[in-house]
Amino acid sequence: MTFLGLYNYWVFIFVLVVGLYAVLVKGNYVKRMIGLAIFQGAVFLLYITMDKVEGGTAPVFLTPFQPGDLYANPLPQVLILTAIVVGIAVTALGLAISIRIKEEYGTIEEAETREIDRQE
């Protein structure tokens, strides 16, 4: 494989860095949740691209198994489906907590909420 032939890994790295940047640098809680969702999407992309078997087919046995047949492993897709459900739940919970913080403090900026906590 050539250096640029691994473009899916370059896309993974780029999306991962964008999500990590948003989680670490942004002070807005909603932007952090969006960054976390982007980060999760990058991990999903990595798992799905690693599953690709050149010349492989789905592991559905319509004919008897022959030595040398290539089948793709279905386990990564199952794990990603579970991770997507968990990711949606985490995002929903984080956004619900952000709404509650907005109701309590009147802002969703981390620096402002810390300042309000210091004043009290």
Image: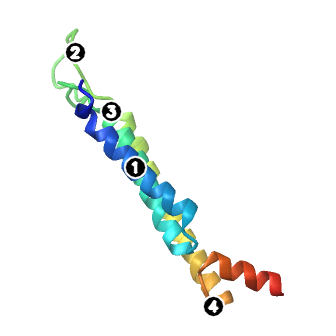
Q: Eyeballing the image, is 30 above or below 88?
A: below
Query: Counting residues from the N terminus, which is met first, the one under dot 3 or under dot 4?
Result: 3
Q: Which residue is mark 1?
A: 42
Position in image of residue 42 (x %, y %): 40, 49
Residue type at tag 1: Ala
Query: Counting residues from the N terminus, which is met first, the one under dot 2 or under dot 1?
Result: 1
Residue 51 circle label: 3
Position in image of residue 22 (x %, y %): 49, 63
Q: Residue at x 20, y 28 (%)?
A: 57
Image quadrant occupied by the N terminus: top left
Kindly tell me whether residue 77 is visible in this rendering: no
- Characterize the local packing of mark 1: few (<14), some (14-19) or many (20 or more) Cα atoms within 10 angstroms: many
Where, by quadrant of the figure, is residue 115 drawn? bottom right
Q: Which residue is mark 4?
A: 106
Residue type at tag 2: Phe
Q: Which residue is mark 2?
A: 65
Separation of residues labelled 3 and 4 (CA atoms): 46 Å
Separation of residues labelled 3 and 2 (CA atoms): 21 Å
Q: Residue at x 23, y 20 (%)?
A: 70
Element under label 2?
loop
Image quadrant occupied by the C terminus: bottom right
Q: Is residue 104 left or right of residue 58?
A: right
Residue furthest to the right in view is: 120
Query: Counting residues from the N terminus, which is met first, the one under dot 3 or under dot 2?
Result: 3
